[in-house]
Amino acid sequence: MLTNSISLESAKTNTELVELIQKDDRVAFYILYERYCRRLHGFVLRYIKQKEDAEEIVQEVFVKIWESRNKIDAYSSFEAFLFTIAYNTTIS
């Protein structure tokens, strides 16, 4: 049943997924994580050159996303928001 739910939700837009995570939908959060974790890791890795540190930063970024899910503007670019958080986390 969970696989069907993930399949259906993975076709949703970022806006729809953000709206769902604002309602504490963990499947939607997982889909956003899967959608962006590799790209985000590569992005962070370009700055710090340490694979393990980049992995930790990506995890930290997604924890921040989950913790601030109710403050995210679902109608703004989630991708830009995500990469901004990643950049700021990386340089701090």
Image (cartoon, rainbow, N blue to C red):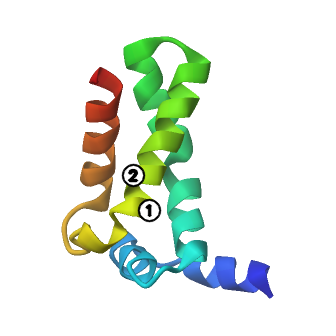
Q: Position of residue 44 (x, y in %)?
A: 42, 27
Residue, x 62% and y 84% (percent of image)? 8
Displayed quadrant of residue 38: top right
What residue occupies the far top of the structure in this picture?
49
* Residue 53 x/y as whole percent: 53, 21
Which image quadrant: the C terminus?
top left
Image quarter in which the N terminus is found = bottom right
- The outermost residue toward the bottom is 1
In the picture, measured across the screen, residue 22 lies left or right of residue 29, that is: left
For residue 64, which numbered disc appears in the image? 2
Q: Which mark is residue 19?
A: none
Local crowd size for mark 2, using a 10 Å CA cut-off: few (<14), some (14–19), many (≥20):
some
In this rendering, the answer to whether 38 lies above or below 35 is: above
Instruction: Please tell me the numbered disc located at residue 66.
Output: 1
Cβ atoms at labels 1 and 2 below 8 Å apart: yes
Q: Which amino acid, mark 2?
A: Lys
Instruction: Name above or below for residue 52 compared with residue 16.
Output: above
Secondary structure, mark 2, is helix
Task: Classify residue 83 as left or right of residue 1.
Answer: left
Q: Is residue 10 visible?
A: no
Q: Amino acid at mark 1?
A: Trp
Locate residue 76, reporting x and y percent: 19, 66
In this rendering, the answer to whether 86 lies above or below 72 is above
Q: Is residue 26 visible?
A: yes
In the displayed structure, does residue 54 sit left or right of residue 3?
A: left
Q: CA distance from mark 1 to mark 2?
A: 5 Å
Q: Please state which of residues 15 and 50 is positioned toward the viewer in this rendering.
A: 50
Q: Secondary structure at mark 1?
A: helix
For image coordinates 37% across by 17% down, the residue present is 47
Q: Position of residue 45 (x, y in %)?
A: 47, 21
